[in-house]
Amino acid sequence: MFTTVFLDVDNTLLDFHKCSLASLRQGFADFGLTWTEDFPTTFHTVNDGLWRQLEAGEIPSRKALFDIRFDRIFEAAGIECDGKAFEARFQQLLGESHEPVEGALELLQYLAGKYTLCAASNSAYQHQINRLKAAGML
């Protein structure tokens, strides 16, 4: 009999794509950049590739990934911007984002009391705690 359920935070409880899009848009506004509708595709293409490189050991750490991520994304998009400064703001904004996946709250309500619920994530602990708390899922 199962007693414990592990749930991934991003794209199971919280919609990472909606959260990242809102964080990107706000970052663009904060840095005075012109938003284009094709930027999210560039972001996801480069970002996903970098995460695959990290998983393959081609990038040594998450910190190293974050150090280069937006420089690479902006280069691919033809945008001049300080990638490290944008990364810092993006991380701050993402840490405040909390758009739930449709049905996630109802799922948690159904499981609560029946099972021990555990959140799993490859993101920073406090970052995810803040997001879950803001979404009413903690």
Image: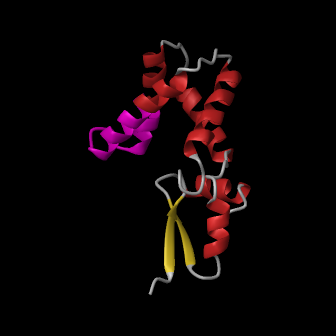
Q: As rendered, which of 56 and 135 lies closer to the eye?
A: 135
Q: As rendered, which of 76 and 80 lies closer to the eye?
A: 76
- In the rendered view, tell whether residue 113 sits above or below residue 49: below
Colouring chosen for the image of the structure: secondary structure
Residue occupying the point 55% across, 32% down:
87
Left/right placement of residue 119 relative to residue 100 reads: left
Q: What stretch is highlighted in magenta?
A: 46-67
| Residue 105, x across and y down, in percent | 67, 62
Query: In the current view of this chain or complex, which residue is farthest to the bottom?
Result: 1
Residue 87 lies in the magenta stretch: no
In the rendered image, the quadrant that contains the C terminus is: bottom right
| Main secondary structure type of the part rendered in magenta | helix
| Residue 75, x across and y down, in percent | 44, 17
Residue occupying the point 67% across, 45% down:
97
Residue 62 lies in the magenta stretch: yes
Residue 90 picture quarter: top right
Q: Can residue 37 be seen in this view?
A: yes
- In the rendered view, tell whether residue 115 sits above or below residue 12: below
Residue occupying the point 53% across, 13% down:
80
| Residue 69, x across and y down, in percent | 45, 30
Left/right placement of residue 22 relative to residue 76 reads: right
In the rendered image, the quadrant that contains the N terminus is: bottom left
- In the rendered view, tell whether residue 28 sits above or below residue 134: above
- In the rendered view, tell whether residue 44 sits above or below residue 79: below
In this figure, what is the number of numbered marks?
Answer: 0
Q: Is residue 70 visible?
A: no
| Residue 39, x across and y down, in percent | 53, 22
